[in-house]
Image (tube, coloured by chain):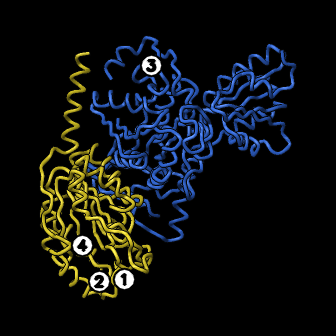
């Protein structure tokens, strides 16, 4: 970590994957597309007293992350397609136990082993709905190496603030891209730590009774005695199958996010003031869409771009507000079904002119692919 | 909450008496439980507890122990949870020699889901999913732990509650991965399918102990545990970083 600090005011070339690695405890399993994160963590974490733990599979990796988080660590893991599928079970456990943690999913082309080294944005719905049962997570999507660094801090902040797993949905392009980046000085980005209970140590209830609230949670070993369970439980964490308790728990898992939606949803706008054509993009495709918007403007089409930084909860209000002024909405994304476009359709209704641009062959979406969705004469 | 004739209560009693004799406090002890009849034990405990997904308890416990090595971390699993669905985590926890104490109640079948065959059900035994006899062979859990690198493994039956308690104390105080296998009757399923009634099942366990089922201290080593080895890694990494 010391070497990093010495260099921090100079621009440096940083890879997206390495920017994500500069985050206390990492537990993971090697998989192509996120391997550099593991190697970087193995190198830098023990230097600063942190721990790198290579587990036997992705199931165990997220389990160790959850265990370490409950012991007070800021813990995370990183994986890609198949590994993310294996993590779904314990991602559900992290939701149920309200355990802060960050899971990086460097999306790759699938299904199954698919194109193991090629990018995709086809896990968008899996990120939201991949687990059984009623549950919700937060998900962010970076579009540059710099965002990988800054948004990882935000990912931990959101995880700690709302006691929820945060999925960091990058894709191969951003993860392997190398860009100049000036690290913020320590203190420049706010760092949020979960609230610990006040008063003398003793038995405490780790789950808030008020459905919209986030209860303070102690760490194992802090002197407080508490109980966390994968089974349905009351505020004390002990198993409880009472229908009223089950309803309370499911409601609070959702309401704690719903009520603080504006603190969670982050978007960025480019050239939207007068935009008649609105591109909606996330991750690396944001870059192609931005170039496409500039190109469209050169051709007399007033195009703008809404970048979805938070992809879950889906930025419905932001999309609705901008789309109202636009005659056409274009959603470029690297998947077949239009996973984000389906959400946009849900928000804007059946009458809106929404055009999908989908690529699912392992190749990046280029500005010309985005422009092809518009009716202006090709050059 | 356990069936009449089940051994879980004896194992839990032995564990709690071991905690008491070792002076463990509720705040410095974390009991991690998996899924199954024995996995419900956390609801009867006043220590810190974490009840987790099926088969994964050792992996959760590993995360706790590497981050807070000073905690007493104890993992309670059944044979289905610990060495069937969780078999991979089990051998790797033993190989890693992480300083956990695993207490596996082996009742030779999945009790909570209705008496199905598990990886410790003996050949030709009857269960709800081997109605014509089990075509597979069983794991010897202690031998498995030993082969994978555990520092300690011992087996006792619930017939010998006091002996079980001594083994737990040995396992809890041993650095590195320690396994205490408690052989226990499941009269509701395993006993019923194999036509052995409750008290008789316990007697039969006592009889087979020393024959196919060797009891006592089986693995006894003192290899450095994971946290001790990782402290060396941290010291080396810091030295290398200072030099840079």
Which residue corresponds to the image point at 28% horizontal and 31% vertical from the top-left? A46
Disc number for residue B5: 2
Q: Are marks 4 and 1 in contact (CB under 8 Å)?
A: no
Q: Earlier in the sequence, mark 4 or mark 1?
A: 4
**Chain identifier, colour yellow:** B
Q: Are marks 4 and 3 in contact (CB under 8 Å)?
A: no
Determine whether the residue tagged by mark 3 lies in a helix, strand or loop: loop
- The residue wearing badge 1 is B188
Which residue corresponds to the image point at 34% horizontal and 88% vertical from the top-left? B195
Determine whether the residue tagged by mark 2 lies in a helix, strand or loop: loop
Labels 4 and 3 share a subunit: no
Q: Are marks 1 and 2 in contact (CB under 8 Å)?
A: yes
Vertical relation: B191 (above or below) A187? below
Q: CA distance from mark 4 to mark 1?
A: 15 Å
- The residue wearing badge 3 is A183
Q: CA distance from mark 2 to mark 4?
A: 13 Å
Labels 1 and 2 share a subunit: yes
Q: Residues within 10 Å of mark 2 (few under 14, many from 20)?
A: some
- The residue wearing badge 4 is B183
Which image quarter: residue A122?
A: top right
């Amino acid at each position: 970590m010391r070497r990093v600090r010495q260099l921090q005011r100079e621009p440096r070339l940083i890879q997206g994957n390495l920017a994500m690695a500069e985050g206390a405890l990492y537990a993971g399993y090697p998989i192509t597309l996120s391997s550099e994160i593991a190697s970087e963590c193995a190198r830098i974490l023990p230097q600063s007293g942190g721990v790198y733990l290579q587990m036997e599979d992705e199931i165990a990796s997220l389990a160790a992350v959850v265990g370490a988080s409950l012991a007070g660590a800021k813990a995370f893991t990183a994986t890609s397609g198949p590994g993310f599928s294996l993590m779904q079970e314990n991602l559900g456990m992290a939701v149920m136990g309200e355990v802060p943690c960050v899971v990086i999913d460097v999306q790759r082309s699938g299904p199954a082993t698919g194109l193991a080294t090629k990018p995709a944005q086809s896990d968008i719905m899996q990120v939201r709905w991949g687990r059984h049962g009623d549950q919700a997570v937060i998900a962010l999507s970076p579009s540059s190496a710099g965002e990988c660094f800054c948004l990882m801090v935000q990912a931990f902040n959101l995880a700690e603030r709302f006691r929820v797993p945060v999925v960091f949905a990058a894709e191969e392009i951003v993860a392997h891209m190398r860009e100049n980046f000036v690290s913020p000085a320590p203190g420049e980005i706010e760092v949020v730590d979960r609230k610990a209970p006040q008063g003398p140590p003793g038995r405490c209830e780790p789950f808030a009774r008020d459905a919209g609230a986030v209860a303070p949670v102690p760490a194992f070993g802090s002197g407080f005695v508490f109980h966390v369970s994968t089974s349905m439980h009351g505020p004390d964490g002990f198993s409880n199958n009472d229908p009223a308790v089950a309803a309370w728990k499911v409601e609070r898992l959702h309401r704690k996010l719903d009520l603080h939606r504006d603190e969670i949803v982050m978007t960025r706008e480019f050239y939207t003031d007068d935009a008649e054509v609105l591109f909606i993009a996330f991750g690396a495709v944001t870059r192609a869409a931005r170039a496409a918007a500039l190109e469209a403007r050169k051709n007399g089409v007033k195009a703008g771009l809404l970048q979805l930084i938070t992809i879950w909860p889906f930025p419905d209000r932001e999309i609705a507000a901008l789309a109202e002024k636009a005659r056409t909405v274009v959603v470029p994304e690297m998947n077949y079904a239009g996973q984000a476009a389906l959400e946009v359709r849900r928000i804007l209704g059946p009458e809106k002119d929404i055009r999908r641009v989908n690529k699912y062959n392992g190749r990046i979406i280029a500005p010309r692919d985005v422009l092809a969705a518009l009716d202006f004469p090709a050059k | 909450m356990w069936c009449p004739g089940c051994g879980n209560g004896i194992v839990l009693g032995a564990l709690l008496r071991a905690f008491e004799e070792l002076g463990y406090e509720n705040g410095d002890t974390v009991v991690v439980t998996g899924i199954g009849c024995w996995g419900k034990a956390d609801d009867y405990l006043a220590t810190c507890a974490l009840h987790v997904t099926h088969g994964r308890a050792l992996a959760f416990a590993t995360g706790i122990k590497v981050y807070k090595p000073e905690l007493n971390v104890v993992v309670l699993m059944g044979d289905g949870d610990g060495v069937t669905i969780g078999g991979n985590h089990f051998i790797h926890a033993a190989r890693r020699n992480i300083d956990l104490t695993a207490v596996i109640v082996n009742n030779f079948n999945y009790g909570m889901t209705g008496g199905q065959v598990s990886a410790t059900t003996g050949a030709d035994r009857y269960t709800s999913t081997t109605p014509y006899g089990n075509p597979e062979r069983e794991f010897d859990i202690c031998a498995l732990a030993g082969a994978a690198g555990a520092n300690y493994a011992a087996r006792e039956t619930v017939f010998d509650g006091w002996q079980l308690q001594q083994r737990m104390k040995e396992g809890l105080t041993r650095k590195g991965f320690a396994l205490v296998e408690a052989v226990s009757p499941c009269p509701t399923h395993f006993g019923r399918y194999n036509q052995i009634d409750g008290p008789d099942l316990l007697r039969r366990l006592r009889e087979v102990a020393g024959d196919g089922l060797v009891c006592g201290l089986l693995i006894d080593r003192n290899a450095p545990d994971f946290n001790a080895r990782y402290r060396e890694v941290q010291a080396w990494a810091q030295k290398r970083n200072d030099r840079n």
